[in-house]
Image: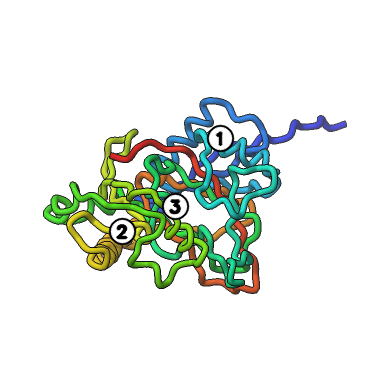
Amino acid sequence: MSAVLPATIPTLQITKVKEHIGAIVTGIDLSQPVDAATRKKLYDAVVENVVLVIRGQAHLTPAQLQAGAELFGELMEDQNRRYLVDGHPLISVLDNFHKDSEGKPAKVGTNATWHTDHTNQEMPPKFTMLYAVAVPDKGGATSVCNSRAAYEGLPEDYRRKITDMKTENTLLSSARFKIANPDILRAQLESKKPPTIQPLVRTHPETGTKAVWFHKSKTERVIGMTPEETQDFLQDLTDRITQPQFCYAHEYQKGDLLIIDDRASLHKAGFDFDHSQQRRLYRMLVRGDKPY
């Protein structure tokens, strides 16, 4: 009679995607307890690779997903509170099937322009997490740019030009009003909050490295420029840094948990998919500190 062999325990593996950006994690189940050493290894992998994808988590309940996200820090509220997971106010929902108040596709939180999240807040998130609940057959990738490596790759004179620049950040730049989601525009027009001043080039609080850091749609102006000049300048800067070697476009599998280090990156959503198919992501944000 043959002996019964014990079940094989998956081994954690972290595989780099590209030289400058991206890594894929397999061999972990976030519904199970995670020890301190593994937690540190995952955290360090996000910081090192700028974007980390934990595969094979389609079985998670919202509560288990939130617990897994909290391995990376304290979660904070998304500033858009319209679409949330029932009973889990720290998990927001990005879904191409959502409609705005005019009955048009809402596109809430699914920004096709390169950006980092919530720059209009004094303490924006340090990590953005996106969990794939439903994905189209193809397309709909989230693209991430390592703006730390991209900054280092800029000519020295250009780095000197931009390093001390400051931006004024609002919920929505006045230069973007004409193409605004009406719900976001209404909130902006009703807001009495003054612009939040942020550095255009941010220092990472853990590594000491510098990265280009902005949200084009939330930048009212670079100080010293008009709003219109600002949009043109930021578009030129975007074109300079989003070179293929610094970017990774992640095509989702259901159950992927994508984690972005917002302090060293820009990201954008892809709309190149069949919109009769659903693209539904849960988003969680890890509380950050004041940029400098």
Q: Considering only order in the chain, which callout, 3 or 2, is on the residue closer to the N terminus?
A: 3
**Does residue 189 lie above or below 63 as drawn?**
below
Whole-percent x, y for residue 193 in the image: 38, 48
Between marks 1 and 3 in the image, the one whose residue lies nearer the viewer: 1
Q: As drawn, which residue projects farthest toward the top?
A: 36
Q: Considering only order in the chain, which callout, 3 or 1, is on the residue closer to the N terminus?
A: 3
Give the image quarter of residue 31: top right
Whole-percent x, y for residue 266 in the image: 38, 54
Q: Amino acid at mark 1?
A: Glu
- Quadrant into which the N terminus falls: top right
Q: Which residue is mark 2?
A: 220
CA gap, disc 2 and disc 3 = 35 Å
Q: Residue at x 34, y 64 (%)?
A: 174
Q: How is the image coloured?
A: rainbow
Q: Which residue is mark 3?
A: 17
Check disc 1 and report its element: helix, strand or loop. Answer: helix
> For this view, does 232 lie left or right of residue 267?
left
Q: Considering only order in the chain, which callout, 1 or 2, is on the residue closer to the N terminus?
A: 1
